[in-house]
Image (tube, coloured by chain):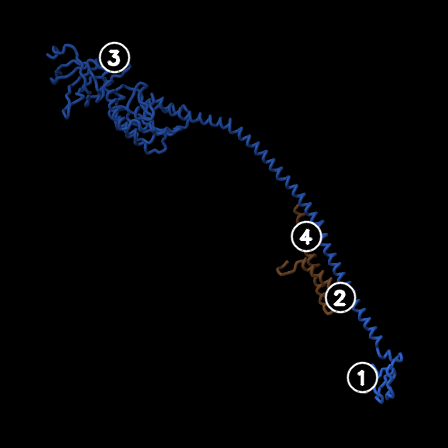
Chain colours: A brown, B blue
Amino acid sequence: MKAGEKSYTEMLEELTRLVDEVGREDCPVDGLETRVARAAELIRLLRERLKATEVAVKSVLSGLESAE
Amino acid sequence: MLSMAFPEPVWVRGVVALGRSKPGAGHTYFQIMDSCPEGSQTPASADCALFAGDRVRISREVGRMGLVFELQDGMEARFLVSPGIYERNGRFSYVVRGFDPDYTGAAEALHLKRLMEKLESEGVLGENGTLDFPLVPLNVGLVTAEGSAASEDFLQTLRESNYPFRVYAAWASMQGAETSGSVTRALVSLTGLSCLDAVVITRGGGSATDLAWFNDESIARTIAQLPFPVISGIGHETDMTLPDFAAHTRAKTPTHAGMILVDRVASFCDSLDNEIRKLHGSVIPRLNLERMRLSKCSSSLREMATRPAFGNLALISRATALIQGRVLPRLSGQNRTLDHLLSQLSRRVSERMTRIGAVLDRMDAETARRDPVRMLALGWTIALDSRGKPLKTVDSVNPEDKVSLRLSDGRLQTRVEKVEKD
């Protein structure tokens, strides 16, 4: 994770908040598009982070197995 | 007259001065001098004649005592003489009839005693004895007469030992007046050999007068200054000369001088053998013990090293399995969370849009329900005043006012006849 970049947890909290907001009646319709777009961006980033983590973990485990 | 005065032979004593005479088989002529002249006085002297017959007799008598009769320059002697006049030159002389070997020995002993006292007080006698005698004296300097029996006895002793002795000989005259200078030069010449372990000065047995030549101060001083320990083996066991006292070690004979060196080397070899045996007796078992301990330690170390390794490998395998079993599912769980959130987002947005649509639909319906055109079609009429504003009450209308009525298909321009309020 680079400096200034949001952590996985922070992004997940933001996504959860956005999902909650778009469902509420007090959320202005004009803001819906912006929120949904941000939520979609967060989902993409989170999926990428998960994928990268999974690849790294598998690589480490594969190294351990070959060392045995 | 002399024969009347000395009807019997008389004893005289003094120092022998042979001059040009060479004691041999025939008659010997020499002088006897006062041994202790006072001041710078010329010592008193008298001619002596030793005829061959007397010489043989005296030699035999002295020989029976185990001694050798030999006239030498400078020897202190006591002779039994018959005073007389030598007819050929008319000079007074003594005809030697007898010899006192005890006196000569005692005189020499006194001389030796005085020398020893002097050298002892100067520390000369003990000097060489302070040197350490090497443990393995294999390089030996030898001062003796070339080809002498003493030389051969000494060298033979070394040869028979089979030890690798190296002998550096400095041949010297070992009897007579040349002894002192020759022996001193020989000793000094050996100082150039730094490899030497010891020096042996030796000669065989001889008369007291023969050996007395070694009672020389310069020989003793030279020995004291040598950097090597000196073994002195001069004469027989009972003979004592000054080098015996000045040297590090006294040997009884030339053979004994060799044996001292051989015994020294043998002693070292024996001690070496003993040490080797001790080594075998103590160190080898110790080494075996240490080897066993080492082997045991090695086994333990191997066991200790491999046991944790196997344990660690198992631990690593378990950890790997745990990581695979926990981390990857967690990642999958997060993926499902994201799927869920996406689904929620989609659903909520959709619901929200649906709700907004419904509101709009209701508003549309209401709007449609309230549409005037629809009301007009139902038979309703909209009354407008002269300015075109809808009339909602009769209060603002007066008789004769023009009122326009809007119907579904057109307008009626009317005039108010009467206002009736409900």
| N-terminal-most mark, 4 or 2 | 2
Residue B266 locus on image (x, y percent): 42, 25
Measured in 3D between alpha carbons, the distance from the residue under mark 1 to the one under mark 2, in whole angstroms, is 39 Å
Q: Nearer the viewer, mark 1 or mark 3?
A: 1
Q: Amino acid at mark 4?
A: Val
Q: Which residue shows up at 80% across the image and 71% down it? A: B360
Marks 2 & 3, CB-CB < 8 Å contact? no
Q: Which is more toward the observer, B207 or A54?
A: A54
Measured in 3D between alpha carbons, the distance from the residue under mark 2 to the one under mark 3, in whole angstroms, is 163 Å
Give the chain of mark 2.
A
Residue A41 locus on image (x, y percent): 70, 63
In this rendering, position of residue B259 left or right of residue B295 = left
According to the picture, the residue beneath numbered tag 1 turns out to be B389
According to the picture, the residue beneath numbered tag 2 turns out to be A25
Measured in 3D between alpha carbons, the distance from the residue under mark 1 to the one under mark 3, in whole angstroms, is 199 Å
| Quadrant in the picture for residue B162 | top left
Q: Amino acid at mark 3?
A: Glu
Query: Vertically, is B215 above or below B405?
Result: above
If the image is split into quadrants, where does the C terminus of chain B sit? Answer: bottom right
